[in-house]
Image (tube, rainbow, N blue to C red):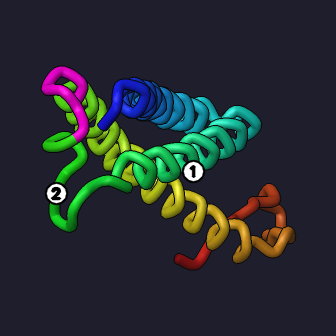
């Protein structure tokens, strides 16, 4: 591989590393938006995640062009320091992704329970008869 090719590969590897870090940051932002119930921030983060993921896919494909089947990017194209940084960033991203998935799953269950709760609510309360005060009751099906 010539010097220009090596420089280009190194630039792509550095960009890949920065994109992994940016995606990790976006997952953190999305989780905070969910926790703080900020829909606009969450939607923006999801769009950013999609954009970053798309670019990561393109870079991964470009870095793997010169590989033989079964050979990893780090074993052939990257120096040890770059490979270690990318591996660490990837591991961090995987851990965040698991937390993010669990939060989304929990949030989805909560939303489903609320939908069930409010869909069973008819909007009218039976009134007690007689001299007693009017009591309101509310029940739901789950």
The picture places residue 9, in percent across and down from the top left corner, at 38, 33
SS class of the residue under badge 1?
Answer: helix
Q: Which residue is mark 2?
A: 71
Which stretch appears magenta?
A: 77-82
User: Does the rendering let one see residue 133?
Assistant: yes
Residue 70 in the image: state x and y as whole percent. 16, 64
Q: Is residue 110 magenta?
A: no
Q: Residues within 10 Å of mark 1 (few under 14, many from 20)?
A: few
Q: Which mark is residue 31?
A: none
> In the displayed structure, would residue 71 be above or below residue 7?
below
Q: Nearer the viewer, residue 96 or 18?
A: 18
Residue bearing mark 1? 54
- Neighbor class of circle 2 (other Cα within 10 Å; few <14, some 14-19, many 20+) is few
Mark 1 or mark 2, whichever is nearer to me: 2
x, y percent for residue 131: 83, 63
- Image location (x, y in percent) of residue 47: 68, 44
Could you tell whether 20 is left or right of 75 in the image? Answer: right
Q: Quadrant of residue 129?
A: bottom right
- The answer to whether residue 13 is left or right of residue 67 is right
Number of numbered discs present? 2
Q: Residue at x 34, y 38 (%)?
A: 93
Q: Quadrant of the N terminus?
A: top left
Nearer to the camera, 124 or 129 = 124
Give the secondary structure at mark 2.
Answer: loop
Residue 130 vs residue 13, the one in the foreground:
13
Q: Residue at x 44, y 30 (%)?
A: 8
Between the residue at mark 1 and the residue at mark 2, the CA separation in whole angstroms equals 23 Å
Mark 1 or mark 2, which has the lower sequence index?
1
């Amino acid at each position: 591989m010539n010097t220009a090719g090596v420089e280009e590969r190194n630039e792509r590897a550095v960009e890949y590393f920065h994109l992994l870090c940016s995606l990790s940051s976006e997952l953190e932002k999305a989780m905070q938006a969910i926790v703080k119930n900020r829909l606009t921030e969450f939607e923006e983060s999801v769009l950013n995640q999609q954009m970053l993921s798309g670019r990561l896919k393109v870079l991964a494909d470009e870095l793997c062009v010169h590989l033989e089947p079964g050979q990893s990017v780090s074993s052939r194209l990257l120096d040890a320091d770059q490979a270690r940084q990318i591996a660490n960033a990837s591991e961090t991203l995987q851990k965040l992704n698991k937390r993010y998935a669990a939060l989304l799953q929990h949030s989805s269950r909560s939303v489903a329970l609320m939908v069930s709760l409010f869909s069973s609510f008819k909007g009218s309360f039976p009134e007690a008869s007689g001299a007693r005060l009017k009591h309101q009751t509310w029940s739901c099906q789950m």
